[in-house]
Image: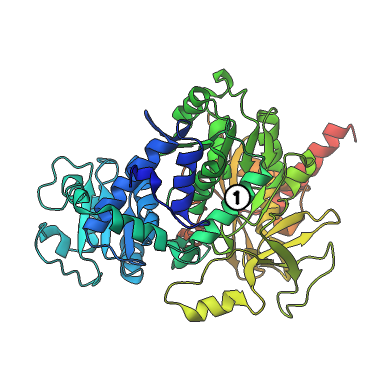
């Protein structure tokens, strides 16, 4: 090869996207993280150098390579390099602890694991690994590694840890790349197919045990291209995304940017103040904060009104309509874009268009991308439902390749004809827009009445003091279940149980009024979602509120406000 960028990869592979971007827009900024940035050509060169180092380790096609890191420069390069040579990147949630960490390392059959000391002292991943796999404490580089809980694991690399004197470091990792011939590298890059598995991503879902979703190169590239098309992404766009690299919510926008020559801005960890400064400094045009907890933190921060966010044209969020309306009012120049999807459905399946009305963009989650189809079925009979009728959302198009080593669960999720069961409810309106109705299992049964948690969450989010609300079902001897509300209030505000109940009484059905209120400052999070099952696990049914004591008071307040006697 006359140049490392002369490598040829098959279309619809991640490697091809990286190389094609380097050829089409070599000097345009590709990737920004903190005070580092690289052009598309520069990022490709770093990825190719990393690919050589991986080949020097003896990494084979389809081999599972684990990454346990917070967002970092090395993380992004590693994923690209692993994909470029046809291996599989197992991107692990850096929040995993205890049994979760043991399970994913064992289940995914990881042979090489890359971690980092960059987050110490806040997050000591080395100590965490040793606590779950004691054999690692004694292991030294050059010795055979035998870990009973992860029998396929051959070695561990500890990057950004200058005090490391036992495990392998980046110094050892970078030694072997020069021994790899151009021919060997070119052959490996050219052999990668769109159907090969690029990543294993453990889906968060609402259950306790993560599921290993296999995502192919073709799915990543096709869905990323459809997102770029729907958002009308162009080379001058700056796509700010603080979401984790162990989730498609980062990899899809990153690959979308490569397809049009745009810039992707990544954060090592989310903090609202630095995030606002970075969006101003980089001239962000698209903000993909996505999840209500992050967006609320941005607009609630003391620096929000002093930052110049005038270049923002789009803000991608999911959440209750009333909360999204608040976001739209806070940043009026940025069109709120809703979307819907699962890891299993390629990350995003529907997305609003910038040309949709405001009501459509906050009350619906868009039309299917050009790559996908959506239908609504009766969850019991699986019969397709007419326009406007509620049922289970099912998805066809670029989908995951199944759950690794779990054929039974794959068969339950994938139906004949290529349809995926989402486990979510919704309906399609007359304009072809999808309305999201919540998880099928995220329903409360209160005295015989079905109550969608999202309905109560949306109502509570309208309160001017409420930053975030989540609802679970609390056991009740008479009604089977009652509403338990977990509430995070806005910065500088205080709130009482009485305020919550008075706000609800008379404004929503009495059986929907919370019987328990818990105020929180932090949420149990997976890669991207609040884990309601953990709220339920730690919930203690103490302090039940007598809602009837507030009914008369609320009625008197309303009469007074309306001038009634």
**On the picture, is 176 further left or further right than 206?**
left
Residue 493 visible to an observer of this rendering: no
Q: Residue at x 31, y 62 (%)?
A: 98
Quadrant housing the C terminus: top right
> Is residue 6 or residue 342 the one in the foreground?
6
Crowding at dot 1, Cα within 10 Å, few <14 / some 14-19 / many 20+, comes out as: many
Residue 400 visible to an observer of this rendering: yes
Q: Which residue is mark 1?
A: 225
> Is residue 155 or residue 271 the one in the foreground?
155
Residue 313 x/y as whole percent: 65, 31
Residue farthest top in this picture = 306
Question: Residue 58: which quarter of the image?
Answer: bottom left
Residue 475 x/y as whole percent: 58, 67
Residue 389 x/y as whole percent: 82, 65
Q: Residue at x 40, y 63 (%)?
A: 191
Could you say whether the residue bearing mark 1 is in a helix, strand or loop?
A: helix
Please tell me whether residue 102 is drawn above or below residue 415 in the rendered image.
above
**On the picture, is 514 further left or further right than 169?**
right
Q: Residue at x 55, y 64 (%)?
A: 344
> Is residue 494 or residue 315 the one in the foreground?
315
């Amino acid at each position: 090869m006359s140049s490392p960028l002369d490598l040829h990869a098959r279309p619809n592979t991640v490697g091809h996207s990286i190389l094609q971007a380097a050829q089409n827009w070599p000097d345009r900024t590709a990737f920004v993280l903190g005070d580092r940035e690289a052009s598309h050509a520069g990022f490709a060169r770093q990825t190719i150098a990393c690919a050589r180092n991986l080949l020097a380790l003896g990494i084979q096609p389809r081999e599972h390579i684990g990454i346990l890191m917070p967002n970092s420069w090395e993380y992004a390069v590693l994923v690209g390099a692993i994909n470029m040579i046809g291996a599989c990147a197992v991107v692990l949630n850096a929040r995993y602890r205890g049994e979760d960490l043991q399970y994913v390392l064992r289940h995914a059959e990881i042979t090489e694991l890359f971690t980092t000391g960059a987050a110490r002292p806040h997050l000591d991943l080395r100590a965490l690994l040793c606590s779950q796999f004691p054999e690692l404490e004694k292991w030294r580089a050059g010795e055979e590694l035998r870990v009973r809980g992860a029998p396929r694991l051959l070695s561990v690399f500890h990057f950004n840890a200058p005090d490391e004197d036992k495990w392998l470091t980046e110094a050892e990792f970078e030694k072997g790349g020069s021994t790899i011939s151009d021919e060997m590298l070119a052959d490996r890059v050219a052999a990668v197919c769109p159907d090969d598995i690029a990543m294993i991503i453990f889906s968060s879902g609402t259950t306790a045990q993560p599921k290993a979703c296999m995502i192919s190169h073709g799915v990543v590239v096709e869905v990323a291209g459809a997102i770029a098309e729907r958002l009308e992404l162009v080379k001058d766009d700056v796509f700010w995304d603080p979401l984790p690299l162990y989730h498609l919510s980062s990899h899809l926008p990153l690959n979308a940017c490569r397809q049009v020559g745009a810039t992707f801005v990544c954060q090592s960890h989310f903090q609202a103040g630095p995030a606002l400064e970075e969006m101003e400094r980089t001239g962000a045009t698209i903000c993909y904060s996505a999840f209500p907890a992050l967006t609320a933190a941005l607009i609630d921060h003391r620096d929000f009104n002093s930052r110049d966010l005038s270049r923002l044209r789009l803000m991608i969020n999911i959440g209750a309509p009333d909360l999204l309306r608040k976001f739209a009012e806070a940043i009026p120049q940025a069109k709120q874009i809703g979307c819907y999807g699962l890891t299993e459905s390629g990350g995003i399946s529907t997305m609003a268009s910038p040309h949709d009305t405001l009501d459509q963009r906050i009350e619906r989650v868009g039309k299917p991308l050009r790559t996908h189809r959506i239908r609504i079925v009766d969850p019991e009979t699986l019969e397709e439902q007419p326009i406007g009728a509620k049922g289970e959302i099912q998805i066809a198009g670029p989908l995951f390749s199944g759950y690794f080593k779990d054929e039974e669960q794959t068969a339950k999720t994938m139906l004949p004809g290529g349809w995926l069961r989402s486990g979510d409810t919704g309906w399609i309106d007359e304009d072809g827009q999808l309305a999201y109705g919540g998880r099928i299992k995220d329903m409360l049964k209160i005295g015989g009445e079905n109550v969608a948690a999202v309905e109560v969450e949306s109502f509570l989010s309208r309160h001017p003091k409420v930053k975030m609300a989540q609802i679970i079902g609390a056991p009740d001897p008479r009604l089977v279940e009652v509403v338990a509300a977990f509430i995070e209030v806005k910065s500088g505000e205080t709130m009482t149980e009485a305020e919550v109940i008075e706000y609800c009484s008379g404004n929503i059905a009495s059986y929907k009024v919370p019987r328990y209120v818990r105020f929180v400052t932090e949420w149990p999070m997976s890669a991207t979602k609040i884990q309601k099952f953990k709220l339920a696990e730690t919930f203690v049914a103490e302090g039940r509120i007598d809602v009837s004591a507030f009914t008369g008071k609320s009625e008197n307040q309303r009469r007074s406000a309306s001038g009634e006697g």
